[in-house]
Amino acid sequence: MTLSDKPRDDFFVPEVKWGPLNVIVASTITLLVSIAILSLGGVLGTDTGFETSITSPTGYFIGFLSGAGAVILLLLTRSPLWPVTSALLFGVVIIWISYLLAVDAGNGVAEVIGVPLAIITATVTSGTFAVTALSFSIVLYRQRLNSLGVVKIHGFKPYFFAIGMWLIALTILMVWIAALSWLKLDFLLPPDTAQQVIDTAGGNLITTLILVGFLGPIAEEIFFRGFVLPGLIKRFGVIRSLLLSSLLFGIFHFDPGAIVPTFILGLALGWVYLKTGALWPAIFAHGLHNSLAIMLAKYAN
C-alpha cells in the first residue's frame, strides 16, 4: 500500500473550519507583517545609531507599505484585524525599545544585556506566525487550541517516533548535500544558518538556544503544522497537503539553498504531526534540529 492509498483514518487529522483560502490569506498577511517589522525595526536601529541592513527612508517606505497591505488584506477578507495589527505594533515597539536600551557590541552591532538585536528581531518575527494562526483559528472561527494540535501527549513513544523521523530527514539531507557537492552545484548548498546565528549572538549560547531552539520552533509549528497542514487537507488530501505545507515551509526561509532542506524537514515534522495528532513531538524534533545545529556550530571546531 502506498502512502497516498492509506485511508484518512490512519492519520490524526483534526476537523477544522478554515480552508485553503484562509491559508493563502494568512500566509500572505504573515509575510507582509514580517517585512513590515523587519523594515521598520531596521530604520529604527539606524536612527538610534546602529548598523542595520535597511536604512531610512527606504525602510519606512517598505515598512508602512507592507503594513498597510496587511491591513487592507485583512479588511478585504474580513479576517481578524486587531490581533494581527496589535502583533505588528507590539513587534515594532519591542524592537524600538530594544534599540533604545542597546549598547554597541562592536562594528555597529546592537546588544541588549548580551542579546543581539538580530536575534530579538528574528524571534519577534517568528511570533507573527503563531499570532496569525491563533487569530484565524480561535478568533475568526472560534475553535479551541486542540484544533491546532495543542493536545496532551501520553508517554514517550511519540517523541521517540519524532526523533526517528528527524534522523531519516537528516540522512536524506546529508545525501542531498553530498550530491550537490559532487555535482559542484554550490549555489544550492544550504547556508550555514547555525554558524551565522552563533556569530550574531556573539557566542551567547543559552539565549540563542532559548530563542532559536525553543520559541522559534513553537511559533513555526503552530503555523505550518497546526494551521496550514489541516487547512489544506479538506481540499487536497493528506499527502498533497503534506507536500504543499512543507514546500511553503521551505519557501518562507527565502534562501534558495534553504528551500530543499527545510522542505525535507517539513515533510518529517508534518508526518510526525499526522501520525501523533499533537504538535509537541513535532516541536520537540524541530527544536532538537535547531539546537543541535547551534551546538555543532559552536563546538565542532
Image: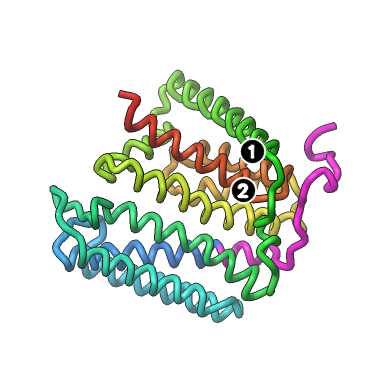
**Crowd rating for badge 2 (residues with CA inside 10 Å; few <14, some 14–19, many 20+):** many
| Quarter of the figure with residue 89 | bottom left
**3 or 98, which is in the foreground?**
98
Residue plotted at (27% across, 40% down): 203
Label disc, if present, on residue 159 of the rendered structure: 1
In the image, what residue type sits under mark 2? Trp
**Residue 96 position within the rendered picture, expressed as x and y whole percent measured from the top left:** 27, 69
Element at label 1: helix
Q: Quadrant of the N terminus?
A: top right
| Quarter of the figure with residue 103 | bottom left
Residue 21 within the segment the image draws in magenta: yes
**Going from the N terminus, do you reach mark 2 or mark 1 first?**
1
In the image, what residue type sits under mark 1? Tyr
**Residue 248 position within the rendered picture, expressed as x and y whole percent measured from the top left:** 56, 50
- Measured along the vertical axis of the image, is residue 283 above or below residue 97? above
Q: Are marks 2 and 1 in contact (CB under 8 Å)?
A: yes
Q: Farthest residue in the front direction?
A: 155
Q: Between marks 2 and 1, how big is the CA–CA gap? A: 8 Å
**Left or right relative to 12: residue 196:** left
**Left or right relative to 121: residue 222:** right
Residue plotted at (25% across, 55% down): 53
Residue plotted at (30% across, 53% down): 118
Q: Which residue is under mark 2?
A: 280
**From which residue to which does the magenta span run?**
1-26
Residue 244 within the segment the image draws in magenta: no
**Left or right relative to 180: residue 11:** right
